[in-house]
Amino acid sequence: MRFQSLYGEAAGDWKLSADWSPEAPFFGAVAAPLLVALIGAAERHGLTVVGVEPHFVTAWNRCQGALKAGAWFGLVHDQVLTVGAVEGRRLRAVRALALPHGADQYWLSQVLAREALLLGLSAPACLQLSGPVPPAWTQAPTQSAHVRVTAFTPGVQGASQSAVVILAGGAGGAGAAPARRRLRIDFAPASLRRTLFQLPPAVWAGAVLGLALCVGAALAGQQLAERGRARAAQTRAAEQRLARARVQVLAPAPKARIAPERAAYINAAILQLNLPWRELQEAVAAATPPAVALLTLEPDAKKHVLRLSAEAKTSDDMIAYVQALKEQEFFTGVVLTRHETNEQDPNRPLRFQLEAEWLAR
């Protein structure tokens, strides 16, 4: 009903496409028979329609990034000037104006002033145009024409039509949209090819990267599986060799006879090797203060006794040292066996001997 009241046409005869931004809705319409004819012509030639955009929408999307602040946007095509009235950062309205013969700057200024008055806006001081601009419009403004006209560079405008986008006439729009935002108006029917065509380059790059990662992961998984199978085969071969070796009957080796004296010597050497040297050293080192000088350490592996001789400056140092050895967890008992003063030494130190017993483990 709204469409019919605005344009006097039944909505069923038109294909509508809207850019439903919550803050700035924008819509376009194309005649349904024209759209059906375009799609049918493409199908007859084995092609798929991936996009049908209004000419104004295509030009706006291409040029809106270079639009200056305070300027309106215009598109010149087929003796028609389509004007996009911009308010701040919003596209306020779109108007299609037929170009009369000999339209000059004065005509352009009057038309823009009238459209601004109808929209309740200030007349623009600049109009940036896309398409073939009449030479008379690019001259310096006169007193009666206050609108400065500039044309977008060819690099910004691009080609007048796109090889992959079919431009449909008969579309109009009203409403508001942010000036720095592309308009998403497309009448092409939904399809897989259209969806793929509209994917941004970043998505394609991500898909290619993901595919490469998947292929790399598959190859790595295959290599790991092959290595696992090779290790399993090696393990089975080793188990088979071990099983065959167990089956073989080995003749018992003759027992060698050792003389008692040699056996006693070997046992003593084994006991000596099994001495807890590290524990003995750590326990003695922890209990020995700077005032005590160790002279000898003689461990008896068979009796689990450590005979120790040392020198101290005073008897108090000696007694304290004996007590410190008793406090070590490694020793089960400490006995002072002898002490005397070394008269040959000018400092006359106290020389003593003791025995520390440790628990067999």
Image (cartoon, grey):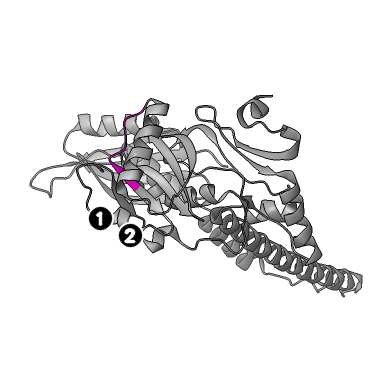
Specify the principal SS of the magenta part.
Answer: loop
Q: Residue 352: x and y, percent?
A: 27, 41
Does the magenta-highlighted stretch encompass residue 334? no
Query: In the rendered view, would you say 7 is above or below 282?
Result: above
Q: Residue 144: x and y, percent?
A: 23, 41
* The magenta segment: 121-127
Q: Residues within 10 Å of mark 2 (few under 14, many from 20)?
A: few
Would you say 76 lies left or right of 136 here? right
Q: Which mark is residue 135?
A: 2
Would you say 134 lies left or right of 55 here? left
Q: Residue 155: x and y, percent?
A: 40, 63
Camera-nearest residue between 223 and 97: 97
Q: Which residue is mark 1?
A: 139
Element type at marker 1? loop
Does the magenta-highlighted stretch encompass residue 126? yes
State the residue at coordinates (55%, 51%).
55
Q: Residue 68: x and y, percent?
A: 32, 45
